[in-house]
Amino acid sequence: MLKSLEEFSIGEKGIIKSVSGEGRVRRRLFDMGVTPGAEVMLRKKAPLGDPIEVTIRGYELTLRKDEAALVTMEVK
């Protein structure tokens, strides 16, 4: 099942299938290791849902909700 990273629940894991967006935002995500094939686990969400904290490639990364919406995931 495919869904965006922003729709994940705490503790849910998945594999990145694609990263949409363009220009600086997409490049920034790639530079942080958010690339197709990487495994991601949602660790925390802020009380209002923005930002979120994920574990990817062995480190914790904080993303804004609009950035997470650009990442399409396959749920494990």
Image (cartoon, rainbow, N blue to C red):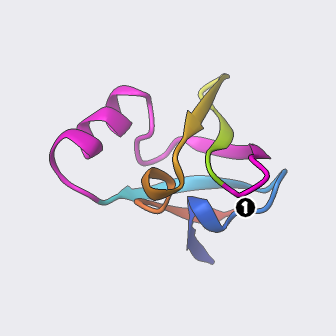
Q: Is residue 16 magenta?
A: no
- Mark 1 = which residue? 76
Q: Is residue 39 magenta?
A: yes
Query: Label 1 sits on what residue type?
Result: Lys
Relative to the observer, which residue lies in front, 6 or 41? 6
Q: Residue at x 73, y 61 (%)?
A: 76
Report the number of discs. 1
Q: Does 19 sit above or below residue 38?
A: below
Residue 75 coordinates in the image, percent (x, y): 67, 65
Q: Secondary structure at mark 1?
A: loop
Residue 44 coordinates in the image, percent (x, y): 78, 43
Residue 25 coordinates in the image, percent (x, y): 27, 43
Classify the position of the N terminus by image quarter. Answer: bottom right
Q: Residue at x 78, y 62 (%)?
A: 9
The answer to which quarter of the image holds residue 73 is bottom right
Relative to the observer, which residue lies in front, 65 or 32? 65
Query: Is residue 2 left or right of 42 when viewed as pictured?
Result: left
The answer to which quarter of the image holds residue 56 is top right
Residue span colored magenta: 21-49
Query: Is residue 10 left or right of 35 when viewed as pictured?
Result: right
